[in-house]
Image (cartoon, helix red, strand yellow):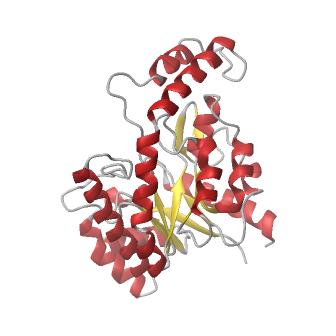
Amino acid sequence: MKPTLALSSCWNSFRHSDGYEMLAEIKSMGFEYAELSHGTRIVLVPGILKAVEEGLIKISSTHNFCPLPTGINHSAPNLFEPSARSAEEHDQWLRHTKRSIEFTAQLGAKVMVTHLGSVHFFWRNPMRKVSRYLAGDSKINPATDETYRKMLTKAGDKLRTRMPPYWEQVKSSLDEVKALANEKGVMLGCENREKFQELPVDDDFPSFFEGLGEGTHCGYWHDTGHAELKAEMGLLNHREHLEKNVDRLLGFHLHDVAEGDDHQPVGYGQIDFKMISEFWRPEHRLTLELSPRTTPQHVLQSRDRITGLINQRFGD
C-alpha cells in the first residue's frame, strides 16, 4: 500500500465551467485522484458528480468550502471563519461547513481540509513591524539576529494575549460539526497556515489534538509551502514541526517555495522533499497544490518527482 497522489483542482478550476471537463483534464495528466479545492464553484458540481459516478477519477479529499457558497466565484476558504465572534458569520460558517462535509461524503472522500480562522487586531497587526524589519535587510538571519528575535517574541506575546476568545470559538465551532463528520465518515484536516495571526499557533497543534481525545473527527494536514514560509521567518523548524504532529497526520499539500513565493512546482525551490517524504505513511493523501500559472510540463515534472519519492519510500 502506498499513499495516494492527487492534483488539486486549484490548478485548473478557473479555466472550466464544466466539472467533468475539469476532472478529465486532471485525469489526462496521469492522476487517478483529484482534490477539489476551495475554488469549486457551484456550476462545476453536476459535472463533478457525473465524473465520479462514471469512475473517471476518484476524489481523495476536498477543501472547505466545497462547493463555494452561491454567488461566490473565486477561491474563498476564509470567507467565513470558525473563529468568528459574530453570530451571523458563525452561522454561515456552520451552514457551509456542514454542506461541505456532506458533499465530501457524497463523493466518497474521507478528508476535508479546513482552515481554523484567525485572531483579529483592531488597530495594527504586531507582525507588520517585524516583517518590515526583516524585509529591510536581506542579510538578516531570522534564526540568530537578536533584534529580530526580540521583536518576534514581543509580537508573539501580543498574539497570545489577544488569542483566547478566538481560539475557544474555534474549538466550539469544531465541536458543532463533530456529530455530522462522524456520521458521514469524514475527517477534518486542520491545515497549518502561513500568516502569523492565523490559528492555531503552530506550537499549539499537539496540545490541540491531545485535547480532542479519542474518536476525534480532526487530524493534521501539513502544507509544505506554508511551513517553509514560517521557517523562513524563524517561526518554526520544518522537520521538528512534522515530528511533533506525525501521529495525527492525514495528508499533505505539496508545493515548493522560491524567493518567498509558494505553490511553485516541486523541485523549483528550496524545500527538502526528501526530508518531507520521511513522514509519509501508506494511508496518507498527498496532493500537489500548484499555482494556476504552473505549466502542464511543470505539473508533470512535479508528479514524477513525488512519484519517485513515493517509490523510494514504499517500493516500486
Whether residue 225 is situated above or below residue 141 in the rendered picture: below
For the question of whether residue 108 can be seen, the reply is no
Residue at the spot 51% in from the left edge and 54% down from the top edge: 289
Residue 313 as seen in the image, left or right of residue 223? right
Whether residue 294 is situated above or below residue 49 in the rendered picture: above
Residue 218 falls in which quadrant of the image?
A: bottom right
Quadrant containing the N terminus in the rendered view: bottom right
Report the front residue among 132 and 22.
132
Report the front residue among 56 and 118.
118
Residue at the spot 50% in from the left edge and 51% down from the top edge: 290
Most distant residue in the bottom direction: 54
Report the front residue among 254 and 157.
157
The x, y position of residue 178, in whole percent, is 45, 70
Residue 18 falls in which quadrant of the image?
A: bottom left
Residue at the spot 67% in from the left edge and 38% down from the top edge: 270
The x, y position of residue 35, in whole percent, is 48, 66
The x, y position of residue 251, in whole percent, is 61, 62
Report the front residue among 122 and 313.
122
For the question of whether residue 75 can be seen, the reply is yes
